[in-house]
Amino acid sequence: MSLLKVENLNVYYGSIHAIKDISFEVNQGEIVTLIGANGAGKSTTLNTVGGLLKPKTGSIVFNDESLVGTKAHNVVRKGLALCPEGRRVFLQLSVADNLEMGAYTRPNSEVADSIAMVYDLFPRLKERYKQVAGTLSGGEQQMLAMGRAMMSKPKLLMLDEPSMGLAPILVDQIFDIIKDLHSKGTTILLVEQNAQKALSIADRAYVLETGRIVNTGTGEALLHDDSVRKAYLGG
């Protein structure tokens, strides 16, 4: 069943045509990844779906409801959460306070259970729950950003470059967590510079080049596609 369906999306920054008539979908229970070089339009796509940017034309249907024109905070209320590029945690707040900020759509009676769920996913955050977020390592801040997004109990979690700037051992850990979230029932739309890692866990993938989708297929198929390997996998 299609949970998110984007059709003929066009996005501009002033006169710059950043997203050019792209269409894609994410089905319930999938991991779908968007891969491409820097500047291909991956983050712009997520930010538009999440309500941070307004498309010039096109449709965005989530859970059978149009999102075009919906403010970002109301997109979250509808069950779609974005974990942004660069983490964007509240640096002056504690880990626990950051998580509570992610629960603004939830009844107060459910917040404690959600925090317990996040601490189960990210034991490191439980150890650091009183610590100011700005003093966490990059990997810990990424865990916090993902945990904050999960506090809204999203039907679809969008992850924008979760491995950016992390050491290889932490990259492996973040991808293990993504697989764990998926196994627990979260549908995921992943934007990731590490194409090898992204394709290895994705059910399906779309390749973006300069704002256009130029290839699509299963993660496994694109891992072995010669053009994809040459462009993004170093092979």
Image: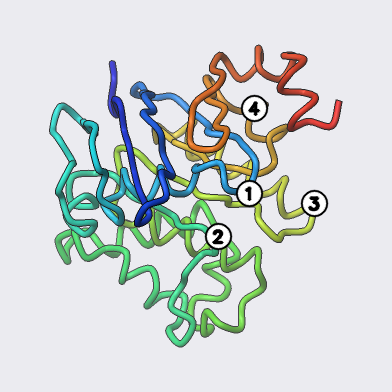
Q: CA distance from mark 3 to mark 4?
A: 17 Å
Which one is earlier in the sequence, the residue at label 4 or at label 2?
2
Query: In what element is the residue under mark 3?
Result: helix
Q: Which residue was labeled with disc 4?
A: 199
Residue at 56% across, 76% down: 128
Estimate the x, y position of residue 149 in percent, counting from the top left: 38, 56
Residue 143, disc:
2
Determine the CA span between mark 1 and mark 4: 15 Å
Q: Quadrant of residue 148?
A: bottom left
Neighbour tally class for label 4: few under 14, some 14-19, many 20 plus, Cα within 10 Å: many
Contact? badges 3 and 2 (CB < 8 Å): no
Q: Looking at the image, is mark 4 or mark 2 nearer the viewer?
A: 4
Q: Is residue 115 left or right of residue 211?
A: left
> As displayed, is residue 38 above or below residue 84?
above
Give the secondary structure at mark 1: helix
Q: Which is nearer the N-term, disc 3 or disc 4?
A: 3
Amino acid marked by disc 4 = Leu
Please give the residue where the numbered disc 1 appears in the rendered image.
174
Residue reaching furthest to the right: 235
Viewer-nearest residue: 14 or 26: 14
Total marks placed:
4
Q: CA distance from mark 1 to mark 3?
A: 10 Å
Front residue of 214 and 206: 214
Q: Position of residue 18 (x, y in %)?
A: 43, 44
Sequence-first tag of 3 and 2 = 2
Q: Do the residues bearing badges 4 and 2 touch, measured as CB atoms within 8 Å?
A: no
